[in-house]
Amino acid sequence: MKWVLYTICIVWIATGSSLILYTEQTRQYISRWLRSGQEILFVVITLLVGLLLMFAAPFSRHSWFIVLMGAMAIGKAGFIFFNPNNLYDQMREWYLTKASDQTYRFFGILMLILGTAIFSWVE
C-alpha cells in the first residue's frame, strides 16, 4: 500500500505545482472539469481516495494524520453527494468565479506542502 501513498503524493505535488506556476491554465481546466455535470464521478474519486488513504495509513510514520486526511476526504464525498441547501453548488461557484489567483496559489502551496510531507513520512 506504499504505492498508494506515493501515487497520491505525486498527484498532489503535481497539482499544487501546476496551481502555483500555471494558475490561469489550471483554473480553466478545473473549471471545465467541475462544470461538466459529473458530480457523481467527483464523489466516487474523492471517496476512493479517502478509503485508500485509510487503508494505507499503517504504512506511514504519522498514520493518525493520514487517517485524518482520509476521513476528511470521505466527509467531503458525503457533503458533495448530499449537497445540503445547495451549499456545495455555492462553494463551487465561488471557487470557479470569485476566488482570486492568490487563493488558487495558496491552495497549490497547501497541496505541495501536504504532498511533500506525506511523501517523506512513508515507511
Image (cartoon, rainbow, N blue to C red):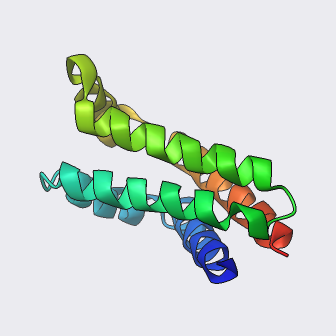
Residue lying at the far left in this picture: please name it.
37
Residue 67 visible to an observer of this rendering:
yes
24 relative to 70, above or below: below
In the rendered image, residue 103, in percent from the top left (x then y), is placed at 53, 40
Numbered circles on residues, count: 0
85 relative to 46, above or below: above
Residue under the image location 29 percent in, 23 percent down? 87
20 lies left or right of 110: left
Residue under the image location 67 percent in, 49 percent down? 67
66 relative to 10, above or below: above
Task: State the residue in front, 5 or 92.
Answer: 5
Q: Quadrant of residue 48?
A: bottom left
92 lies left or right of 63: left
Residue lying at the far bottom in this picture: please name it.
3
In the rendered image, residue 92, in percent from the top left (x then y), is placed at 30, 37
Task: State the residue in front, 8 or 104.
Answer: 8
Residue 101 visible to an observer of this rendering:
no
Task: State the residue in front, 24 or 15.
Answer: 15
Q: Quadrant of residue 54?
A: bottom right
Q: Quadrant of the C terminus?
A: bottom right
Residue lying at the far top in this picture: please name it.
85
In the rendered image, residue 122, in percent from the top left (x then y), is placed at 80, 72
40 lies left or right of 77: left
64 lies left or right of 28: right
In the rendered image, residue 105, in percent from the top left (x then y), is placed at 58, 50
Residue under the image location 14 percent in, 56 percent down? 36
Q: Quadrant of the N terminus?
A: bottom right
Residue under the image location 36 percent in, 61 percent down? 45
